[in-house]
Image (cartoon, rainbow, N blue to C red):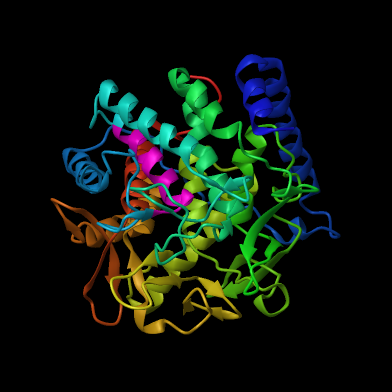
């Protein structure tokens, strides 16, 4: 089934979606029954009784000021001609993941009253119009990166690439989140969303319920590889599922589930090793925060998220180091680092995208601090946001974080950090951002 067909169903056949939602409920119920079965990975999960998700509430004046600071980034980095936003301050390129962060930022800003309906509609319309004009990798799906001015396919150095460099199924799943929100909550943009999606060919990306990305090999050939590890894979699959597409295997948390003991907390990680499967199994905050803020957790993701959070709280209790880890741009080479709870067999490991040691760049992540506080609002998350509150330029937006070793700000300014902060604050005020119905 094509994206167009899925979207038409989503709007015009409510019986189908009602059945889909019911199916979601049945899957959750059946998974719940399986907890305790000694032959399943769920048997290893004892559901925590201490999880206490903070209820929505009105933002304080300080929190509203924080949201307006985040919006400054998008005011400064919107390209008038295309309506797209730079992924990094003044750097004219963006991935689909960062474009999603922008679209979710616009939705959050409208819900918080930072922008009015006229500006909201104009920004969404312009961005979606540009997405319809972008050339697709091999005519099938969006390239991994585009120039925000020319809309050309580019490589990760923002150099034009006539062929392109492939697509990311995880990034595409991420952009389907605002597409779903727009379709359900802002029907004036449904036709524009349809125009973006109707040219996409999902067949090579969705194979027997599994997400596949595409990359170009050194000899110029296209390679297709399973994409996503625990946390990110399931998060991305949820938005595909809302479109009525088969991601049944990527949705399951338990296929490659294993646990690592971190200070007495059983934290879930992916059993697929980088050596065997060619991709790292980062345990970071971001996919769990986004899942909670955007969709509201299911019973398994809620438990796994809680453990990821508690491990970070426990590290602070044991070391005095404020800990909120995720992947982030940094303001110096290598420019992007995965600060993790666990990866590649090591706890509190920080590595580059190539797997090289980056421990000197361990960072308190600003977006993770805001995200965990929005979801839990504990004494510990209060400490996190109090520290994170110092990491901003009021005229440019929020910095990505604070380096542990030097104690200096990581002054990278990005769409993702500022978009997630806006999402977290909108969640704090109004609850999860994606709801089926009003």
**What is the magenta range?**
94-109
**Residue 118: horizontal and vertical position, in percent?**
27, 21
Tell whether 217 sits left or right of 110: right
Quadrant in which residue 23 is drawn? top right
Q: Nearer the viewer, residue 176 or 125?
A: 125
Q: From this viewpoint, is residue 296 visible?
A: no
Is 407 placed above or below 175 here? below
**Residue 68: horizontal and vertical position, in percent?**
20, 41
**Residue 398: horizontal and vertical position, in percent?**
24, 55
Q: From this viewpoint, is residue 218 visible?
A: yes
Residue 105 forms part of the magenta stretch: yes
- Point 23% across, 62% down: residue: 387
Tell whether 238 sits left or right of 246: left
Is 275 placed above or below 129 here? below
Quadrant in which residue 32 is drawn? top right
Placement of the N terminus among the 4 image quadrants: top right
Tell whether 176 sits left or right of 411: right
- Point 33% across, 68% down: residue: 364
The residue lying furthest to the left in this view is: 395
Query: What is the magenta segment's predominant secondary structure?
Result: helix
């Amino acid at each position: 089934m094509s994206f167009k067909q899925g979207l038409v169903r989503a709007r015009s056949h409510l019986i189908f979606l009602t059945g889909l939602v019911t199916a979601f409920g049945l899957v959750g119920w059946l998974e719940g029954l399986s907890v305790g079965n000694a032959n399943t990975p769920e048997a290893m999960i004892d559901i925590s009784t201490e999880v206490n998700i903070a209820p929505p509430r009105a933002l304080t004046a300080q929190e509203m000021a924080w949201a307006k600071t985040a919006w400054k980034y998008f005011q400064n980095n919107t390209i008038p001609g295309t309506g797209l936003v730079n992924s990094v301050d003044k750097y004219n390129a963006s991935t689909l993941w960062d474009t999603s962060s922008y679209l979710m930022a616009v939705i959050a800003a409208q819900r918080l009253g930072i922008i009015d309906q006229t500006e909201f509609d104009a920004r969404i319309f312009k961005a979606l119009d540009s997405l319809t004009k972008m050339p697709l990798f091999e005519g099938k799906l969006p390239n991994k990166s585009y120039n925000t001015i020319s809309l050309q396919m580019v490589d990760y150095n923002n150099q034009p690439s006539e062929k392109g460099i492939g697509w990311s199924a995880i990034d595409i799943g991420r952009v389907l989140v605002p597409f779903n929100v727009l379709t359900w909550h802002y029907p004036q943009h449904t036709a524009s969303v349809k125009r973006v999606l109707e040219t996409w060919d999902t067949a090579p990306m969705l194979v027997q319920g599994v997400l596949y990305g595409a990359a170009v090999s050194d000899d110029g050939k296209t390679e297709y590889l399973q994409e996503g590890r625990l946390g990110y894979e399931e998060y991305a699959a949820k938005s595909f599922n809302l479109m009525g597409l088969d991601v049944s295997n990527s949705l399951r948390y338990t296929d490659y589930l294993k646990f690592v003991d971190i200070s007495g907390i059983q934290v879930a990680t992916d059993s697929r090793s980088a050596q065997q499967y060619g991709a790292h199994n980062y345990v970071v905050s971001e996919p769990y925060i986004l899942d909670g803020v955007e969709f509201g957790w299911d019973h398994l993701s809620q438990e796994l998220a809680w453990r990821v959070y508690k491990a970070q709280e426990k590290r602070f209790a044991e070391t005095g180091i404020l800990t909120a880890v995720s992947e982030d741009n940094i303001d110096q080479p290598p420019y992007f680092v995965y600060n993790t709870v666990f990866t590649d067999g090591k706890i509190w490991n920080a590595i580059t995208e190539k797997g090289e040691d980056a421990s000197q760049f361990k960072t308190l992540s600003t977006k993770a601090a805001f995200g965990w506080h929005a979801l839990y609002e504990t004494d510990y998350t209060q400490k996190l946001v109090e520290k994170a509150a110092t990491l901003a330029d009021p005229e440019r937006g929020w910095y990505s974080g604070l380096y542990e070793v030097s104690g200096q700000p990581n002054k990278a300014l990005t769409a993702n950090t500022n978009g997630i902060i806006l999402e977290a604050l909108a969640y704090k005020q109004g609850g999860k951002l994606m709801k089926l119905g009003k």
